[in-house]
Image (cartoon, coloured by chain):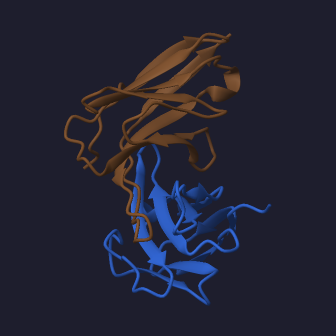
Chain colours: A blue, B brown
Amino acid sequence: GAGVSQSPSNKVTEKGKDVELRCDPISGHTALYWYRQSLGQGLEFLIYFQGNSAPDKSGLPSDRFSAERTGGSVSTLTIQRTQQEDSAVYLCASSLVPGFTYEQYFGPGTRLTVT
Amino acid sequence: DAKTTQPPSMDCAEGRAANLPCNHSTISGNEYVYWYRQIHSQGPQYIIHGLKNNETNEMASLIITEDRKSSTLILPHATLRDTAVYYCIVRVVDYGGSQGNLIFGKGTKLSVKP
């Protein structure tokens, strides 16, 4: 079946512009996560959605970052007034909850470059 | 901060077993050990997880010490395609409850050489 998909795969934007990154989770997965990975760094958690519960936003680095999940499926991560330090690969993952493994399935990521 | 310690890098000859260690000396009784890997330019991929018993699947085996303070991921016959960064993660699994995010450390960069 289809895995997690993300779009665009690459995004180049000018400093100060807003960007929107999209994630389509695996159908039926109720949990959705956003992470980012800067060059040479590990994966950093950003935000977590679980069903109809309030999202866990504890990983968002600043108020320029926001995310929403419509209809319990597609999610959009928005970065306002982008800065060069926002350049990274943004990864989305989903998981089936409840489920024995709670395995998170990751998408291929969106590479964001802020010039 | 990650609750695990892994060597930054390891080499393995193609066709040989790759044994990747992980220390998790502060693991709690309700925390599982998970392994993910990230092949270059791809998203992380789940490999295996376990609580206290050794586990095996089609990808790997997981050996957890009796005191649960460390574990070893074993790739029995490493191939060039197994070259990746391997992450050992400990997390609570609350069946039916909220799971939360994975906390990734720096992992071990495994290089499988011909």
Q: Identify the residue shown where x is 56% and y is 21%.
A: B111
Q: Identify the residue shown where x is 54% and y is 62%.
A: A99
Residue B32 position within the rendered picture, expressed as x and y whole percent measured from the top left: 37, 46
Residue B6 position within the rendered picture, expressed as x and y whole percent measured from the top left: 34, 29
Q: Nearer the viewer, residue B48 or A25?
A: B48
Q: Is residue A79 left or right of residue A58?
A: right
Residue A58 position within the rendered picture, expressed as x and y whole percent measured from the top left: 31, 72
A33 in relation to B12, above or below: below
Residue A21 position within the rendered picture, expressed as x and y whole percent measured from the top left: 60, 74
Query: Is residue B56 visible to us here?
Result: yes
Q: Is residue A83 left or right of residue A97?
A: left
Quarter holding residue A105 = bottom right
Q: Is residue B65 left or right of residue A114?
A: left
Quarter holding residue A19 = bottom right
Q: Nearer the viewer, residue B105 or A78?
A: B105
Q: How many marks?
A: 0
B98 in relation to A55, above or below: above
Q: Identify the residue shown where x is 53% and y is 71%.
A: A32
Q: Is residue B25 left or right of residue B90?
A: left
* Residue situated furthest left in the rendering: B26
Q: Identify the residue shown where x is 29% and y is 27%.
A: B66
B69 in relation to B14, above or below: below
Query: Is residue B35 visible to us here?
Result: no
Q: Quadrant of the C terminus of chain B?
A: top right
